[in-house]
Structure formats: structure tokens, C-alpha cells
Image (cartoon, grey):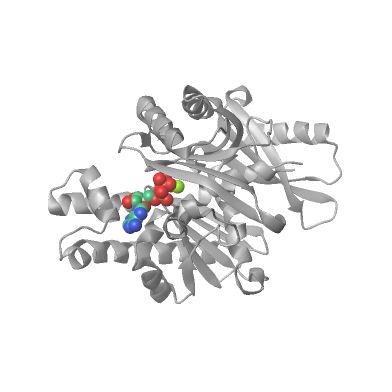
Amino acid sequence: MGKISFLGSKSRQLAGLDISSSSVKLLELGAGDRGALRVERYVIEPLSGEAIVDGNIGNFDAVSDGLRRALRRFGSGVKNVAIAMPASAVFAKKILLPAGLRELDMEMQVETEAAQIIPFALDEVNLDFQVVGPAGSPDEVEVLVAASRKEQIEDRVSVAESCGLKVSVVDVESLALEAAFELVVQRLPNAGSGRLVALLDIGAAVMNFIVLRDGQRVYAREQAFGGQQLTKDIARQYGMSLDEAEMAKRSNNLPDDYASTVLRPFLENLALEISRALQFFFTSTQYNEVDYIMLGGGCAGIPELVDVVGKRTQVPTCIANPFTAMSVPTKLGTRKLLTDAPSLMVACGLALRRFDE
Ligand SMILES: Nc1ncnc2c1ncn2[C@@H]1O[C@H](COP(=O)(O)OP(=O)(O)OP(=O)(O)O)[C@@H](O)[C@H]1O
Ligand SMILES: [Mg+2]
């Protein structure tokens, strides 16, 4: 049984396309030497402020133009893409079904269950499911049911089509993130075996928090928090436009008092959000610690962040890089990829869909 794809069909040559709050990201992976993967190419093309609003396409033309610019720089003939729906647009729930059901029977059971958990008519949503694994008892399996409104999927698909692309996979953002995270965890001592490993992907608008153990998801949550706040703080403090503030932030081209006046309070706030998220994880599960924290998302580019999170949580903390075991063509620049890697987690999870069985 395959992974979630709201539209079904699969194809061989395929790029990951992450349309997110701050940018359009395209990434193509290929087969490298000795079974390793290879980063073929990627681009990150910034989007203006209102292009994406709450995970939805807010301004179609702005996103479409951004994607067209991205494709020009991408320089690949790839037509098929895998895209992701943000968690805010997806209803997902794990259910238990009898083991050994035939595919068709399982589909029918899933539809019956889905009708109970989804607040829309079934014909308004795209529905898919994935067997996650055995349940507690041998005669049941755990099945992840996911649904997204057709309207919201169609918005994203039309943007891709407006640039001549064909969407062959529609995934869920947190699942794509998880797929990339599994690669990152492999790099831990002993491949993180038996350990609770947390990923904090801090983007522009959303912070995703995932905990895995032995490749199994133990916990996943997202909350509204991200680097947009810091950009706003900079704009306000120094009387800049949001675009100017964003540029100044990324190039670290800011007045001397930036570190103490703007960055420090933001980091304090972020550390607080993170300890709260961890507390919430501990109180709502059987666990009361994590063994490692990995930082993803563009905010991982804030040099002080690893230190702040490590000190605050007292958990070994490092930056997530899904490409460490992949070969990288020299023209891409290893340094640059290292900087961009944490923000390419979702794009990487989507690009991996090329290798689906
Ligand atoms: N070097 C850097 N220093 C500080 N902040 C950075 C740096 N690089 C990127 N960022 C910030 O990271 C954020 C973008 O991260 P990312 O690309 O992961 O977000 P996104 O996927 O577009 O957003 P979301 O997932 O929230 O929809 C922006 O707020 C950006 O300012
Ligand atoms: Mg993101």
C-alpha cells in the first residue's frame, strides 16, 4: 500500500515543489553512486508577503510568477512535481482496521470512518489512506486517513499547471517533513536506534514539531510561530519595509544594537515557545524526555539558535541536514547547500517521492 497522495498516479521523473509562506522551493533528487542519492538541483525563489496566507494561495499571480521565476533558474526539463498540503488544510486521523482486509474492503471501511471525522461532505474532499503498521493486537492494523478539500488542492494544482507543470503527487506537509527527517535521523550515532528524536522545523509562519523513534512517529504538532515575527520586529524597529527587513536579516546587515534590542527578545520568545511545545508533548504522551533536538526551517539559519535551544532545553541540539549522505555536484556549492539544507526539508521529502515503489 503506497503513501498518501490525494491525486493518485505516480511517475518516475519528479521534482519536489514546496510552495510555502516565504518562498517557492524546487528540488530534484536522483540516483547517485552505490545506491546513494544525489542532489541534482534546487532553487529557492522568494515570494512577497501576501502571496501565501495561512497556508493558502492568497495571490494567485504572485505565486504563479514566483514559480515561473523559480523554474527558469531551476534549469530542468522535469514536468512532474510532488506538492504538499499544509497541515491547516488537512484532516488526518489514525484509525484501527481489521488486519488482512483486501484493498477494496479497506477503501470502503476508510470511507465510512472518514465520513465520521471529516466536517465536509465526502464529495468535497480528496481522500487517501496509508497503512502505518501493526496495531497493539495482531488482528488489527493502524491506518492513517487523510483528507483535504478539493478546492484547496485545486488552488495549488492550478498554480503548478499555470507554469506548465503536472502535479503527480499531492502529499501532506508534515508527512513530507517526516520523510526527510528519517534521513537526518540515520546520521545519528547508531542511527538513533531506540532514541526519541525531535524535529523543530521553524519556517516563516509555522513551527512544526515532530518526534520520531525508530522511524515511527510518536508525536506531531504544528503551531503558528516563525521568522515572520522577527522580520516584523526588524521592520518596526528600524523603519524598514518588510522586504527590506527580510533582506537585511538574511544578510546580517543590521545596526549594532540589533543583537540586543531585536534578536535577543525574539530568541527568548522562541525558546519559550519551544519549552512549551516540549512540555505539551510530555503531558500528552507517556514520554518525559527527548534525546536529541534537530532544527529545521529557515530560522535554523539564525546562528545563535542552536545554542539558545540547547541551553534552554538541556537537550543535545543540532541543525537538520537531509543531504549529508547524498552526493552534491560541485556547481551547486556545498557551502550554500549547507546553509539552505534546513529550509529544504519539505522539498526533500517531496522529491523523495520519485523513488516510491
Ligand atoms: N540566514 C537566516 N537568518 C535568519 N533567518 C532566516 C535566515 N534564512 C531564512 N530565514 C528566515 O526563515 C524563514 C523562512 O524559512 P522557511 O523557508 O523554512 O519557511 P517557509 O517554509 O517559507 O514558511 P512556512 O513553512 O512557515 O510556511 C523566514 O522568516 C526567513 O526570514
Ligand atoms: Mg516550510
Q: Is residue 206 visible?
A: no
Which quadrant, please, contains the C terminus? top right
**Residue 88: x, y in percent?**
48, 40
Q: With 196 as the anchor, is 231 left or right in this view? A: left
Residue at the left extreme, as displayed:
239
Which quadrant, please, contains the N terminus? top right
In this view, 39 is above or below 150? below
**Residue 139: x, y in percent?**
85, 51
In this view, 77 is above or below 87? above
**Residue 22: x, y in percent?**
37, 43
Q: Residue at x 37, y 47 (%)?
A: 205
Q: With 115 as the anchor, is 275 left or right in this view? A: left
Q: Residue at x 26, y 49 (%)?
A: 247
Q: Which residue is drawn at 84% across and 46% down?
A: 99
**Residue 86: x, y in percent?**
49, 41
Q: With 101 as the anchor, is 306 left or right in this view? A: left
Q: Which of 257 and 128 is in front in this view?
A: 257
Residue at the front extreme, as displayed:
331
